[in-house]
């Protein structure tokens, strides 16, 4: 049995990938999610050599010297730097396939709904260059819906909101397709930037983008909290030029991130207005599913419930929804491939 499993493993190495602005996840058929790392690559600019990829490279971000540059090759949900993305996908796939070097896998990849033909082609080309035999693309909200267990094939409307690092996707799914979809290039990254801006203006404190993200995760919220939260924010005092740390509470950070959060709410309300009445009635009874890392913002579900008067559901680990959904398509490929757009 063990031998058979091993043999089978040699020939079947199909993968599903959530190539995100902030994180890349890979699902391997029969194994589950086998990789979950930041979409960051550190490059030595002097020698044109890759120093690190993933976790290790994220640690280097903002801490590098003049010869090493840490790059986030994905921006706003799409490939911004083709060569570096290519290197990253290659590295991740090799890491996952380890000793199955000769296997050319089939791969299902999640892409944002707003993606252009050129951007789609970039994803396909980068995957092929990484050794993938057959690439299939699925729109991220569709993958997210499957990932949270919505019966997407039914003639019934379900709304999914996926808030990632670079894009927010709002979609209504019915009959294995996206009946209405909207995608905007505003998500977690914008919230981090808003926190960085706020610290500079209100406290003359210059902080890095990942410190902004850390603060958001530690104490950020979209709705007043029952219990006060504080964190020490570290940065450079722009007046004195000296590094310092400042205790900040949740109320200030809620104020700092108010604008991008309000924009996300506006997009959701606009989508609800545009949905045809039958689907709208379904959403009224089924509620809204919130996925992506943005679903972890404290009180965002409550704020959406208050603004829309609809019930909001968040899965246990919203960061995994797209990858799980893409994996489910792979597991049942011949039945499910109709949801893929390529
Ligand atoms: N606990 C948390 N609280 C608030 N935000 C969080 C938390 N954990 C992760 N995030 C945010 O979620 C975002 C990453 O989510 P996700 O991995 O879904 O994005 P992505 O798929 O890489 O991006 P995209 O889908 O836009 O390409 C980041 O902005 C990150 O800061
Ligand atoms: Mg995503």
Image: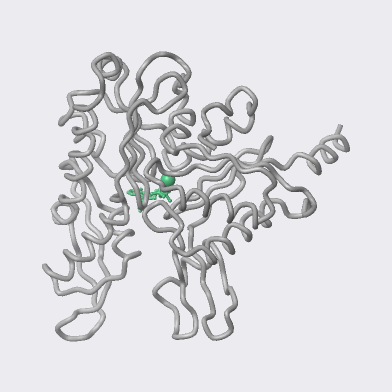
- Quadrant assignment, res 267: top left
Q: Colour mode?
A: one colour
- Quadrant assignment, res 289: top left
Q: Position of residue 15 (x, y in %)?
A: 64, 42
Residue depicted at 66% across the width and 43% down the height: 134
Is 179 displayed left or right of 331 in the figure? left
Closer to us: 315 or 285: 285
Looking at the image, residue 37 lies above or below residue 323: below
Closer to us: 171 or 317: 171
Q: Position of residue 230 (x, y in %)?
A: 22, 56
Is 289 displayed left or right of 253 in the figure? right
Q: Quadrant of ligand 2?
A: top left
Looking at the image, residue 270 lies above or below residue 96: above
Q: Position of residue 163 (x, y in %)?
A: 34, 43
Residue depicted at 41% across the width and 32% down the height: 315
Is 307 displayed left or right of 219 in the figure? left
Is 145 displayed left or right of 35 in the figure? left
- Quadrant assignment, res 209: bottom left
Residue depicted at 51% across the width and 63% down the height: 82
Closer to us: 19 or 3: 19
Which quadrant is the C terminus positioned in? top right
Q: Position of residue 328 (x, y in %)?
A: 57, 30
Looking at the image, residue 237 lies above or below residue 156: below
Residue depicted at 41% across the width and 43% down the height: 112
Which quadrant is the N terminus positioned in? top right
Outermost residue to the front: 117
């Amino acid at each position: 049995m063990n031998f058979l499993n091993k043999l089978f493993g040699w020939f079947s190495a199909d993968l599903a990938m959530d190539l995100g602005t902030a994180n890349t996840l890979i699902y391997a058929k029969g194994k589950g999610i086998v990789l979950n790392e930041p979409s960051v690559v550190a490059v030595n600019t002097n020698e044109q050599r890759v120093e690190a990829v993933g976790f290790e490279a994220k640690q280097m971000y903002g801490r590098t010297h003049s010869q090493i540059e840490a790059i986030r090759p994905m921006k706003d949900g799409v490939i911004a730097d083709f060569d570096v993305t290519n290197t990253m996908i290659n590295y991740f796939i090799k890491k996952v396939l380890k000793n199955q070097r000769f296997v050319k896998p089939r791969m299902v990849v999640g892409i944002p709904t707003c993606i252009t033909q050129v951007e789609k082609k970039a994803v396909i080309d980068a995957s092929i260059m990484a050794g993938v035999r057959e690439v299939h693309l699925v729109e991220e909200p569709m993958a997210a819906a499957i990932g949270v267990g919505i019966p997407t094939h039914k003639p019934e409307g379900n709304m999914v909101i996926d808030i990632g690092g670079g894009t927010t996707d709002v979609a209504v799914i019915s009959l294995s397709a996206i009946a209405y979809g909207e995608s905007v290039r505003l998500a977690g990254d914008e919230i981090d930037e808003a926190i960085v801006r706020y610290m500079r203006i209100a406290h003359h404190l210059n902080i890095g983008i990942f410190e902004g993200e850390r603060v958001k995760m530690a104490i950020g919220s979209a709705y007043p909290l029952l219990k006060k939260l504080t964190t020490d924010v570290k940065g450079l005092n722009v007046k004195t030029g000296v590094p310092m740390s400042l205790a900040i509470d949740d109320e200030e950070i809620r104020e700092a991130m108010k604008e991008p959060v309000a924009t996300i709410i506006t997009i959701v309300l606009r989508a609800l207005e545009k949905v045809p009445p039958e689907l709208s009635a379904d959403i009224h009874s089924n509620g809204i599913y919130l996925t992506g890392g943005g679903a972890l913002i404290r009180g965002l579900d409550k704020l959406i419930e208050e603004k829309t008067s609809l019930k909001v559901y968040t899965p246990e680990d919203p960061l995994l929804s797209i990858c799980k959904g893409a994996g489910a398509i792979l597991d049942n490929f011949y039945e499910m491939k109709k949801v893929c757009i390529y």
